[in-house]
Image (cartoon, grey):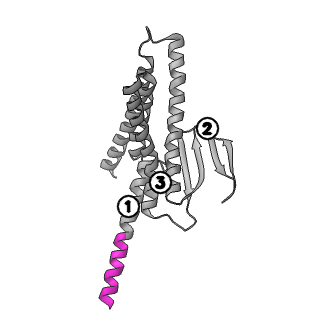
Amino acid sequence: MRVPGRIAARAVAVARSAVGLAGLLAALVALSRGHVRLGGQALGMDLLVLAGVWISSVAFHEAGHVAGAFAQGLAIRSVRVACFALARRSPGGAFGVSLVRWQGGGTTVIDARGRPRARRMLVFLLGGAAFNLLAVAAALWLHRREGGQLALAIGAVNAAMLVVNLLPAAGAAGNDGTLILRTLRIAAMRRRAAGRARASARAAS
């Protein structure tokens, strides 16, 4: 019974939820600043804008994965944002848009040359976080230059998304942090196996 491992996994899950909630609340507070009271039509409009910011941030995050895939020569199989999916009907075929069960987002890739090397997968996986970081920097710069609460809301949502995606999630196969750790672990195992093979070859010669 791996109690410490379970405790650590639950702690990370709580941290992910707390960061995500804090980011959304911070964005909502930023949008509501200047209102006499938080209620009625003002709150409804803020929630609508917040939903738009969140969906846009998810789309920007997935665009980062797409950019990372293109940079490493990986073919895009599908991209999901909220309840929309852009997927190839067949390998190498055209993309089609469909409605799917509501979820955050996700991008899957294929490599015609076989299993992608660790470096190429890491660039693809880190692309989403890199775009979120870029959005945070741009939002802070825009707020400092022009003011306005929308920029702060965009920065808060993207900052939370950056952290939540990089914190590994137990049992979440599509989580960036989980896949990054898995990629690094597999790369380390391959290096050790290659080292043992070279050592055996030298011993046999």
Q: Residue 22 sits in which quadrant?
A: top left
Which amino acid, by three-letter code, is at mark 1?
Answer: Arg
Foreground residue among 14 and 127:
127
Q: Position of residue 75 (x, y in %)?
A: 58, 58
Start-end of magenta stretch: 191-205
| Image quarter of the C terminus | bottom left
Residue in the image at 51% along x and 50% along y? 67
Foreground residue among 123 and 41:
123
Q: Which residue is mark 2?
A: 83
User: Which mark sits nearer the N-terminus, 3 or 2?
Assistant: 2
Q: Position of residue 184 (x, y in %)?
A: 38, 59
User: Which mark sits nearer the N-terminus, 3 or 1?
Assistant: 3
Q: Which residue is mark 3?
A: 124
Farthest-out residue, top: 36
Label 1 – label 2 distance at C-alpha: 32 Å
Please tell me whether residue 204 belongs to the stretch shown in magenta.
yes
Residue in the image at 49% along x and 42% along y? 61
Label 3 – label 1 distance at C-alpha: 17 Å
| Residue 101 left/right relative to 154 | right
Label 2: how many Cα within 10 Å (few below 14, some 14–19, many 20+): few
Residue in the image at 43% along x and 43% along y? 165
Q: Position of residue 85 (x, y in %)?
A: 63, 44
Q: Position of residue 71 (x, y in %)?
A: 50, 56
Q: Nearer the viewer, mark 3 or mark 2?
A: 3
Please tell me whether residue 83 belongs to the stretch shown in magenta.
no
Q: Secondary structure at mark 3?
A: helix
Q: Nearer the viewer, mark 3 or mark 1?
A: 3
Q: Which residue is mark 1?
A: 185
Which amino acid, by three-letter code, is at mark 2?
Answer: Cys
Q: Residue 119 sits in which quadrant?
A: bottom left
Label 3 – label 2 distance at C-alpha: 23 Å
